[in-house]
Image (cartoon, rainbow, N blue to C red):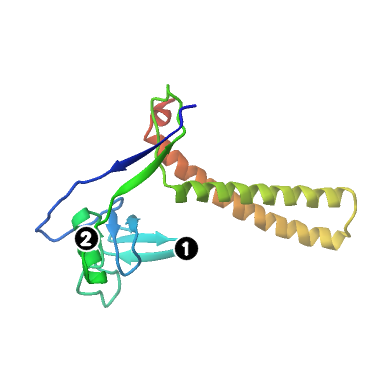
Amino acid sequence: MGKSIRTTSNTQTTTNSTPATFKAGDSVLCPSVGNGTYKLVQKSKDCLTINIGNVECLYRADGRAYHDDCYVLPSLFHDTPANRQAIATLYSGAPTTQSNQRTVIDLTEADDKEVVVMSVFELSDIACDIESAAIVISDIGKLLALIHYKKIDTHTAISMARLTHDATVTWDDLLLRRVNSIKETLAMTSYGKEGK
């Protein structure tokens, strides 16, 4: 298996003198939320969101916060080197040089024709979800064994079955959402085009 670590650099620069507009899928900076780069998601016809865990931050297409009193100034900025530099200068008071380098750990085979690059955060999230689901499935198996071997009384078995059902429904929903997200990525590859 060909394993390597590559470091790549992105040095593109863009200047825009017209007011910015945003759409779902754009990578944006939002200093009021944090220092990272965020991906916009379409919530409704005129509402975009940045999802951070279970928190949704709502914005309009012009980059202003989505509230009844609507802020006058935009809160979103396109993720460009110039905007990162301007925000760093504004918030730290001194210009900083940001190196847009990333480490790529290549676990592909020499004959792989397509590769999907994902963040370590996303990969870790997927691994945690799978591990947690495996633990829940193991717990359900242990509960079923206790019921089968009559190690717990009927009322306790009924209560535990109800809790098990709730856990199963929750994990089913979480894993299906995770699989659908992976399938969306695969749909952009030749694997997504097979069978059509």
The secondary structure type at the circle numbered 2 is helix
Left or right of 70, for residue 54 = right
Mark 1 and mark 2 lie on one chain; the one further toward the N terminus is 1
Residue 11 position (above or below residue 65): above
Instruction: Count every numbered label the image shows and give the total.
Output: 2
* Residue 186 x/y as whole percent: 42, 36
Above or below for 123 versus 59: above
**Amino acid carrying mark 1 in the image:** Asn
Q: Nearer the viewer, residue 183 or 6?
A: 6
* Residue located farthest toward the top when viewing the structure as drawn: 111
Residue 180 appears at what percent x and percent y? 48, 43
Residue underneath mark 1: 54
Q: Which circle, 1 or 2, is nearer the viewer?
A: 2
Measured in 3D between alpha carbons, the distance from the residue under mark 1 to the one under mark 2, in whole angstroms, is 29 Å
How crowded is the residue under tag 2: few (<14 C-alpha within 10 Å), some, or many (20+)? some
Query: Residue 134, percent across and down?
Result: 66, 47
Q: Of the residues shown, which amino acid type is indicated by label 2?
A: Gln
Residue toward you, 23 or 95: 95
Residue corresponding to mark 2? 85
Name the residue: 60% across, 55% down.
Answer: 170
* x, y percent for residue 60: 26, 64
